[in-house]
Image: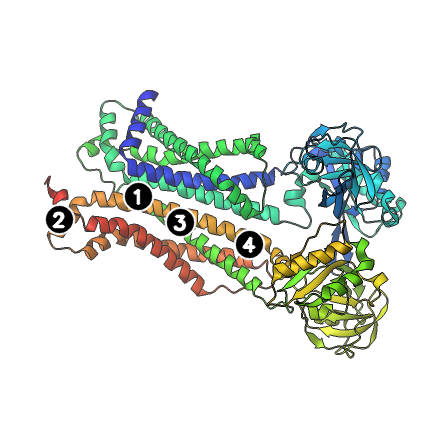
Amino acid sequence: MLQNYLKIALRNLWRNKLYSILNIGGLATGLAAAMLILLFVSHEFSYDQFHEKGNRIYRILSVSKYGEQTVQFTAMNAKLGELLKEANPEVEEFIRINNERNITFKNALHPEIKFKEESLSFVDPTFFKVFTFKTLQGNDKSFLNNPFSLVISENVAKKYFGNENPIGKTLLLEGKQVFTVTGVIAQMPSNSTFQFELITPISTFPKLDASKLSIWERAGSFETFLLLNKQQSVSKVEKTIIKAGKLSGGFDETATYSLEQFDKLHNGSNFSDKTNTKFALIFSGIAILILVLALFNYMSLTTARATIRAKEVGIRKVVGAERLGLVKQFYVEAFIYCLCSFVLAFLLLEILRQPFYEILGLQVDTSFMKSPLFIGVLLSVFALSILLSGSYTSLFLSRFSPIEVLKGKFSSQQSGAIVRKGFLIFQFSVSVVLIICTLVVQQQLDYMRNMDLGLTKDQVLVLPIEESAASKIALFNNELKQISGVKSVSTVSTPLYKGVNAWFTKSLVSKKEVTLFSISTDENFFNTVDLKWLKAPIDNKNLTAKVYLNEVAVKQMELGDNPVGKSVNLGSGTTIVGGIMKDFHYNGVKSKIEALMISVSAPNPAETLSGCIYLRLDSKTDVQAKVAQVQNIYEKYQSEKPFEFYFLDEAFQKTFSDEVRMSKMFFSFTSIAILIACLGLFGLITFLAEQKDKEIGIRKVLGANIRNIVFLLSKDFLGLVIIANFIAIPLAWWAMQKWLQDFVFRISLTWETFLLASLTSMALAFITVSYQALKSAVSNPIKSLRNE
């Protein structure tokens, strides 16, 4: 019997090539899109799940209140973990982690082989005992036992040593400190929170220099993880943190401490970043919608062709076929269609996977696609597709009365028409919602890009400078100023749009707690980024040894109408207010402007600030040529560091990179949703034209023109698209209002956006319908009437 079902299914697929192409093409497109999204979603929710002891690993978190401000920290005193282990038999191991950012290593034997690395990670030797990572070379039980030993990833090994065995070889940190390679690990999985490339034991940290020794002895520097004997021990250990912390030295006893489960940090309990979960949930919804669109497309086209299959069903019932047998037959057909669609979808997945990663700024290990999690997700989607695609059609066709069918009383225009209309309305409703969301997200992005930031970000070249070169920056700056086309040069402690330093002080009048953000710089900074003054400095030629506040800081500190020239205590000592700046966006435009203090240092070469150098270039200058000149000067002063730079406007763009990703995703999947909807509409109009072939012929013989025929075939469909718009617009308005609430500075939703989306959907529907309608309208009526 199964052989018979397969033979019929394949015969129907081959005989009805157009409908097979539309069905398989539409379903494959939807499945490929859903697979891509589910690849991303399952990867997000698989973070850190591969650790064998993951559900027993916890990170210590502290929460402190400063007036109305709540601040959360994960950096702890270096002694805390050990003290907690001593006080709690439930704590099996502790791991401290600290990362030194933007460091340079070079091959000791081949100094020309040098690279700037994102970080060097200091960890306890128990790191590989607690966390599950694959070791390629070396003994993971001992290769972190000695200071200045180094465990590197396979990529780092290849980069510095080629195909040579790296064990026992040496790398130089900043051209001075010798590290010996004792182990090589596999690249940490893409779904790992840790992405360490160079790892050294924590005992190395205080031995590097005096500043590191000082950090080792004070609070707030090391992420601390605990391996508990069981999950139920969490509350007991939490109660002992403050007691243990008092013994550690520097410790905030007023804070509240808790333990966060490590394998839930990436999604859910991460205290500072809900973006991962938000994107995963949004795109999960989009994946489900697109898959449902594709399945509805299949069901709609299948039920539309029910009249062709009706007599077949009637005859089968007359000769003894049971309804269950007919259901099996149509499910076999659904299986064939889904299988063909899945094969095509996998081909599309391979083609689109890398562009998809680039849109998301994501990398997923190839091995993850073979993981039980992702394979299980695909099998679930495959089974769900078969179940849904075959459900309505099998039940709908198998219930036909054989007597009515064989007497010719059955009409697909009555049976299933309402369902098909419902499917079409749903498809275009989803498409219109996605079109509106895409337009609104793009409008919000354009609004943020073009906002008046209160400064000039264009043509500003930024050079990161290491602390070791601080004494040379004055000389470096002087040479940079000599380059033609460089209008201004300034040194800044903390680059704009990369985060800022902050401390807590109190208002001078009401004594309320105030969060005061700070930037240290030189007197050229204001001209370099073109800041505007609310209250200009009294002496424009002498800006040093003073602080400059923005409007928010003056208001929150309650300094009065004009504090310029007055001496005030801002929590870090008494200083003179040199001027009041107009508020400007120094940390992006997604959050409100906070209180800011800019302190200007005296021009003492020995005390010149490190951090980064800003160069304002003339708008007419050759940027590439100037960058080359800057590089030549840079290499005179920082020969140990690879040259790197970026532009200030690029840093600003990255502050809303999540929204850029969302915009690209919405555009991509809106296009797919529209394509699926139009494929379904094209199939339905083609089928309707076939059904009305003789009616069209008669109308033409009686004098109907092309416009009449096109209107006859398209009016019902365009009416359904209009209904879809009425459903979609309120839903899209509600969704976008909720989304825009996350932005302090945001656009207002306007009727033009919704009108544009409606017109776009109707235009696409009309183009889809009109092609087949025109084809039928200009056909020769003799061909359709010759058999009558």
Q: Quadrant of residue 259?
A: top right
Secondary structure under tag 2 reads: helix
Instruction: Kindly indicate whether the residue at mark 4 contacts the one at mark 2 (C-beta within 8 angstroms).
Output: no
Q: Which of the marked residues, 2 or 4, is nearer the chain's N terminus?
A: 4
Residue 120 in the image: above or below residue 510: above
Is 449 located above or below residue 144 in the figure? below
Q: Amino acid at mark 2?
A: Ile
**Residue 698, numbered label:** 2
Residue occupying the point 51% across, 61% down = 443
Q: Which mark is residue 674?
A: 3
Q: Amino acid at mark 3?
A: Ile
Residue at 27% of width from left, 50% of height from top? Answer: 771
Residue 683 image label: 1
Disc 1 marks which amino acid? Gly
- Disc 2 or disc 4, which is closer to the eye? 4
**Residue under pointer 4:** 660
* Secondary element at image label 4: helix
Rendered location of residue 455, percent (x, y): 65, 68
- Mark 1 Cα-neighbour bin, 10 Å: few <14, some 14–19, many ≥20: many
- The kind of secondary structure element at disc 3 is helix
Q: Which comes sooner in the sequence, label 3 or label 4?
A: 4
Along the polypeptide, which appears first: circle 1 or circle 2?
A: 1
Q: Nearer the viewer, mark 3 or mark 2?
A: 3
Tell me where residue 326 sits by quadrant.
top left
Relative side of 459 to 472, left or right: left
